[in-house]
Image (tube, grey):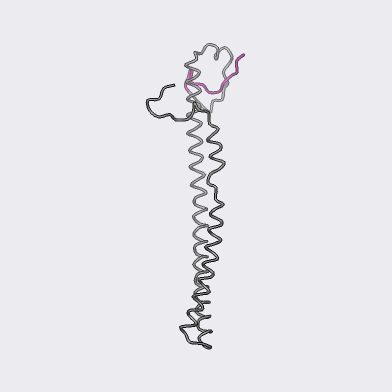
Amino acid sequence: MSMPTQGSGLDSGYHPTAGAPHTAAEVKGSSIGELMGQVTSDLSTLMRQEVELAKAEIRQEGKKAGKAAGLFGGAGFGGYMVALFLSLALWAGLSNVMDGGWAALIVAVIWAAIAAVLYSMGKKNAQHVRGLKQTNESVQRIPDALKPHPEGVTR
């Protein structure tokens, strides 16, 4: 029982666009070494193509992410400026009813409380970060034969 393969390198070299399946007689007439060479060549080509696809996708998505990050950065700076001027307005408003130093201290204490709450929330969220759980699980399922082994180890 044999299955035809596509685009082997037996007679005329590997041509992925040829797409002509080989007949059972062609496959039967090939040695194991030739067949393994074809499989290795096909896997190598597939891996190179997948890496190139991943690079192209990363570049494309990286540009989008960079633009979004820039916009978020601008929004963050705008929010900072709003908070700064609201703080100055609060300080000026409080200094109408009390000494300017005490008004500044009250505004600083308010910002310290906001910072403490944000830190607490950030710390709680950081504890829920689990890393690359799915990637770790899929890597553990790679057969032992495909995993790299230290030099000098023979099997």
Q: Nearer the viewer, residue 64 or 10?
A: 64
Residue that lies at the very extreme toward the right in this rendered image? 1
Q: Position of residue 97 (x, y in %)?
A: 53, 88
Q: Position of residue 13 (x, y in %)?
A: 47, 22
Answer above or below: position of 105 versus 10: below
Residue 6 in magenta stretch? yes
* 11 vs 130: above or below: above
Image position of 11 with respect to 151: above or below: above
Q: Nearer the viewer, residue 84 or 2?
A: 84
**Residue at 50% of width from left, 64% of height from top?**
74
Most common SS among magenta residues: loop
**The stretch drawn in magenta includes residue 10:** yes
- Say which residue appears at 47% left-offset and 34% top-offset: 48
Residue 41 x/y as whole percent: 47, 25
Q: Residue at x 53, y 23 (%)?
A: 7
The N terminus, quarter of image: top right
Q: Nearer the viewer, residue 69 or 45?
A: 69
Image quarter in which the C terminus is found:
top left
> Total label count?
0
Q: Is residue 116 above or below residue 90?
A: above
Q: Farthest residue toward the left? A: 152
- What residue is drawn where x is 49% and y is 75%? 108
Q: Position of residue 17 (x, y in %)?
A: 53, 28
Magenta region: which residues? 1-13
